Image: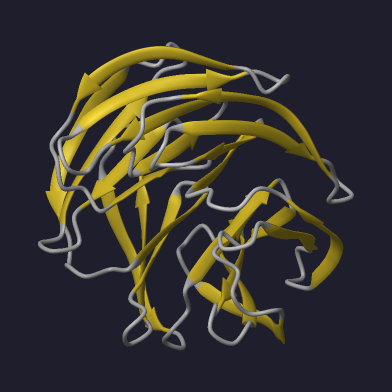
Amino acid sequence: MSRELLFYRADDGLIATGRLGTNGIFTGLADGKLSPNWTHIVPIGRELLFYRAGDGVIATARIDTNGIFEELAEGGLSSGWTHIVPVGRELLFYRADNGVIATGRIDTNGIFTGLAEGGLSSGWTHIVAIGRVLLFYRADNGVIATGSLGTNGIFTGLAEGQLSNGWTHIEPLGAELFYRADSGVIATGRIDTEGIFTGLAEGMLSSGWTHIVPVGQEALFYRADNGNIATGRIDTEGIFTELAEGGLSSGWSTVVALTA
């Protein structure tokens, strides 16, 4: 799988790329500049979808294994999507205020094709893809639901349940990692192909991480205020192991890892 990451700063469009090794060591690759104010950057394989929620403008691009950025295509979608979640090469678009969803696909040339539309419950704060299963979570009350997204863009609900409230980050790392930025508390769990959640382990990390980016079973932890980074790994039993620490530039608003 790919191990490259893109760092983006929304206020001025600066970008940088890097690579995370399986030993948790980060290596910088390249720097550049894009348009400012993208609100969502979504990895689909080696391609990326850039979306601006205020006006629906989109652009697509590709990053090679040397971290070099190549623009592909431009276009427009509906404005106001709060979540855009990649599931393979398909995408789920969701609006938290009204629950409206739409699905689409991006090919390897960066061309977007719409697939289907529908509606779910409103108010989900986190939507995370684990394979083709999606976990929906509400931070205010801990309610969860799961569903699957087919390659035809059709969404199917699977199961419902309850977790603790207040998780600020939920990231797929083989086992799923739940993190609270205010306290550093973590928990891990697993979701099977039927959408059933099983808790695994609990623990504690440093508080204040603003970004947690999965790269295979490893993860990059980043603090936007001071640029501190740390890396770690979660095994199949949900146990977290710290790997390395370091520092990057502060102020990155988006950090994403390529998925292929």
* Image location (x, y in percent) of residue 158: 87, 61
Residue 174: give x, y in percent of width and height: 66, 30
Q: Is residue 4 above or below residue 194?
A: above
Q: Nearer the viewer, residue 91 or 97?
A: 97
The answer to whether residue 181 is visible is yes
Q: Which quadrant would residue 30 be assigned to in this image?
A: top left
Task: Identify which residue is drawn at 71% across, 84% down.
Answer: 119
Q: Does 225 appear above or below 4?
A: below
| Total count of labels | 0
Q: Residue at x 38, y 81 (%)?
A: 75
Question: Could you say where residue 78 lies in the image, as x and y percent from the top left?
Answer: 46, 88
Residue 51: percent from left, percent from top: 37, 72
Kindly indicate the quadrant of the structure image that contains residue 77.
bottom left
Residue at 30% over, 21% down? 26
Q: Is residue 168 left or right of residue 149?
A: left
Left or right, 158 with reference to 240: right
